[in-house]
Amino acid sequence: MIKNLCNIIGNIVIVIFKANRADINRAEQENLAAPLLKRLRFTKGKIEESCKGLESLIQLDDPVGVTLSAIALDEGLNLYKVSCSIGVIGVVFEPRPDALVQISCLCLKSGNAVFLKGGSEASATKCKLFFYHKERENIHADLQNPPHCRGDQGF
């Protein structure tokens, strides 16, 4: 699933850039500070950097189910410390479209479900990434649309 994300982003890069341009235009009209505008931009370089990061993540060993230590407590009674997923993670992040990609993939790799709440300044870009990934990967049958992303997303 993570491996496919770079291909998905590459296939919809024009759609992402168009949505990101809408976010930037709205942010400029709202006089968003220059450093925040810079983080809001989802450029070709940021996309390439995100994909390189995902490729590195894919190469890492699966972090779930690793025996970290074992102790023999008694004859036939062993205690094991085994890594496992946390379960559900909630993340609130600033308006950086690349953060959505990074956070969601880290959670997938570690076997966790995630609730994401990104800055509203990047809403159009986040919605395009969310809906396209959801539609193409069928992530989870119960996956709900974020409230600010309801409606036709142009797919």
Image (spheres, rainbow, N blue to C red):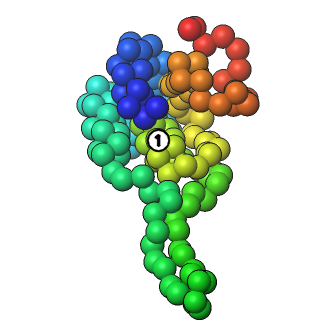
Q: Looking at the picture, which amino acid does disc 1 mark?
A: Cys
Q: Say few, some or many: other residues with alpha carbon within 10 Å of mark 1 (under 14 / 14 to 19 / 20 or more).
A: many
Residue lying furthest bottom: 74
In the foreground, 101 or 126: 101
Residue lying furthest front: 75
In the foreground, 77 or 54: 77
Residue 103 percent coordinates (x, y): 49, 45
Tell me: 134 left or right of 68.
Answer: right
Tell me: 53 left or right of 133.
Answer: left
Q: Secondary structure at mark 1?
A: helix
Tell me: 66 left or right of 150.
Answer: left
Tell me: 39 left or right of 122.
Answer: left
Residue 70 percent coordinates (x, y): 48, 79
The quadrant in which the C terminus is found is top right
In the foreground, 63 or 46: 63
Q: Residue at x 46, y 63 (%)?
A: 66
User: Can residue 115 be seen by looking at this rendering?
Assistant: yes
In the figure, 62 relative to 102: above or below? Answer: below
Question: Badge 1 is on which residue?
Answer: 105
Q: Residue at x 46, y 69 (%)?
A: 67
